[in-house]
Image: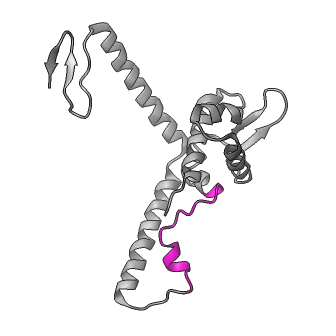
Amino acid sequence: MRLTSKGRYAVRAILDLTFNSNGRPVRLQEISERQKISLHYLEQLFRRLRKGSVVKSVRGPGGGYVLSRSMDEISVRDVLTSVGENINPARDLIGSGDIKSDTVEFILTKTYFENLGLIMQEYLTTTSVGDLIRKARGTQEATRAASTLLDSTGFQIPAATGATVNVGKGRDLS
């Protein structure tokens, strides 16, 4: 599997659309500005996402795009396959007519990457847009709670990386 910018941008755009829809259609221009993705490129991606039944368009004033189904019914795999991403790491080994071998090494390699492909397919299929949104909202809530704690105490909270962080008035807690 080689995940290209096409796949990464499609997932980012769908997450942005989901976060910012609040029950209303979202214009591609808004996503473009927030995500710093070319509007022309987003138009191409959303044409494919619409054909893949991930989003639907709403015409007229206040129009834009909305998810075609609930965020829990759209998997990351749906998004990636809609835009044409190859999510099978063994595809080149299996699909290539030029490479045919019956050596033990070839068979082991082919089997290994076929199994890896199955695991990846399952992971992408069982991870929904809703799962990612809930994870992001949980992270946002934790950040807000930490920020509130920081504001109320005047102390800085040590970074999760274990780096030394100044706390209060020049004191150092590590």
Foreground residue, 126 or 43? Answer: 43
Seen at 15% across and 21% down, the residue is 173
Seen at 63% across and 31% down, the residue is 33
Q: In this picture, is 56 found above or below 161? A: below
- Can you tell which quarter of the image residue 146 is in? top left
- Can you tell which quarter of the image residue 148 is in? top left
- Can you tell which quarter of the image residue 138 is in? top left
Q: In this picture, is 17 found above or below 91? A: above
Q: Position of residue 19 (x, y in %)?
A: 58, 31
Answer whether residue 8 is magenta in the image: no
Left/right placement of residue 113 relative to residue 151 reads right
The stretch of residues the image draws in magenta is 81-97
Q: Position of residue 14 (x, y in %)?
A: 61, 41
Left/right placement of residue 61 relative to residue 162 reads right
Q: Position of residue 144 (x, y in %)?
A: 40, 20
Query: Farthest right residue?
Result: 60
Left/right placement of residue 117 relative to residue 164 reads right
Foreground residue, 8 or 113? Answer: 8
Q: In this picture, is 52 found above or below 69? A: below
Seen at 57% across and 85% down, the residue is 97
Answer whether residue 82 is magenta in the image: yes
Seen at 65% across and 55% down, the residue is 82
